[in-house]
Image: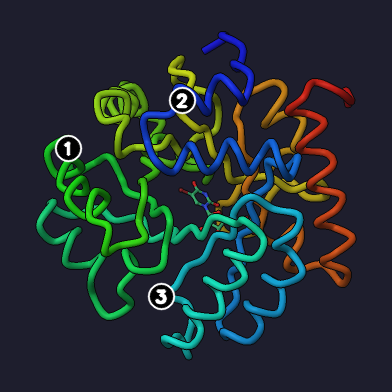
Amino acid sequence: STKKRAPLSVRMENASCRLNELLYKTMQQKESNLCLAIDFTQKEQILELAKVAAPHVVAIKLHADCITDFDDQFVKELRTIAHNHHCIIFEDRKLADIGAVNILQLKGHQNIAKWADVVTVHAVQGQESIEAFRKVINDDNYCLSGILLIAQLSSKGALTQLDGYTQAARNIGEANRDIVAGFICQTKISDFDDMGHWTPGVNLDAKSDDAGQQWRGANEAIRRQLNDIVIVGRGVTASKNPKEQLERYKREAWNAFIGGDHD
Ligand code: 5BU
């Protein structure tokens, strides 16, 4: 898509999905389009970095199933950080089963729907299986307020680049904008103002790891490829000075978003 982004105020007003009202408001208030992926295995490590990161980011992304000592206390402390700093809690679970099982997984041993604002879902299982999320998202007993559909992966050779896949995922998302807050993608794919384009595969100092990941800079991802939100993991988490890197990634990504600095 080549269409430019609408202003955040317009996107907020046009938000069909509850998550996006919160997201665009938070982006504007914090002047940030940064999401930190904290891929650590111990809750204390995660909470420690989450506290440092929370003022700078709009979302904190987790892989709860990688946490070896995950428990209710962790969830409670995480929600407190999110509340105090207006942060979205994002569980990158990548659900990919039939609708009925996706719902069981959301309410399963980690009870994702109770503490995550948003969760990733694959598109591979088809539209009706994705529409099954509506019941949980519309139920006030759960925290979950939207899903992100995976339209493109960042990894080399990802099958999401096969002909028609990304467009088919986009169509499912656009037809269900009350529950699908946007996409995980590499370039902007939807012209609906309210849809958020969240992009992983960003690192300012390296191009790839040794396991298929592909990285590009924030300017490429945001200014050229017109994504909205940068998802950064190891660029921050593997650094000796995460706070300094958070400030750097936040500044680079926001400048690219508001059309400031060029590389
Ligand atoms: P990194 O350390 O910046 O490479 O971490 C990227 C994060 O984004 C990591 O948690 C992945 O699970 C996540 N990710 C990704 O890298 N690529 C994708 O296509 C999707 C998620 Br979907």
Q: Point out the quarter of the image occupied by ligand 1.
A: bottom right
Q: Residue furthest top?
A: 3
Q: Nearer the viewer, residue 118 or 230?
A: 118
- Amino acid on which disc 2 is placed: Asp
Q: Earlier in the sequence, mark 2 or mark 3?
A: 3
Q: Label 2 CB, ligand 1: below 8 Å?
A: no
- The reply to whether dot 3 and dot 1 touch (C-beta < 8 Å) is no
Q: Is residue 254 left or right of residue 159?
A: right
Give the class, few, some or many, for how many residues have Cα within 10 Å of label 1's Cα (few <14, many ≥20).
Answer: some
Please state the horizontal and vertical placement of residue 36, each as a whole percent of the image: 65, 57
Image point (77%, 69%), residue name: 52
Nearest the eye: 112 or 8: 8
Nearest-to-viewer mark from 2 and 3: 2
Question: Spatial distance from mark 2 to mark 3, Cα to Cα?
Answer: 30 Å
Q: Residue at x 42, y 62 (%)?
A: 116
Residue identifier under label 2:
194
Above-or-below relation of 2 to 76: above
Between marks 1 and 2 in the image, the one whose residue lies nearer the viewer: 2
Q: Mark 1 highlights which residue?
A: 126
Q: Secondary structure at mark 1?
A: loop
* SS label for mark 2: loop
Q: Which residue is mark 3?
A: 65
Q: Amino acid at mark 1?
A: Gly
In x, y percent, where is residue 64? 44, 73
Question: In the figure, residue 214 lies in which quadrant?
Answer: top right
Q: CA distance from mark 3 to mark 1?
A: 24 Å
**Ligand 1 within 8 angstroms of badge 1 C-beta:** no
Name the kind of residue labelled 3 in the image.
Asp
Q: Earlier in the sequence, mark 3 or mark 1?
A: 3
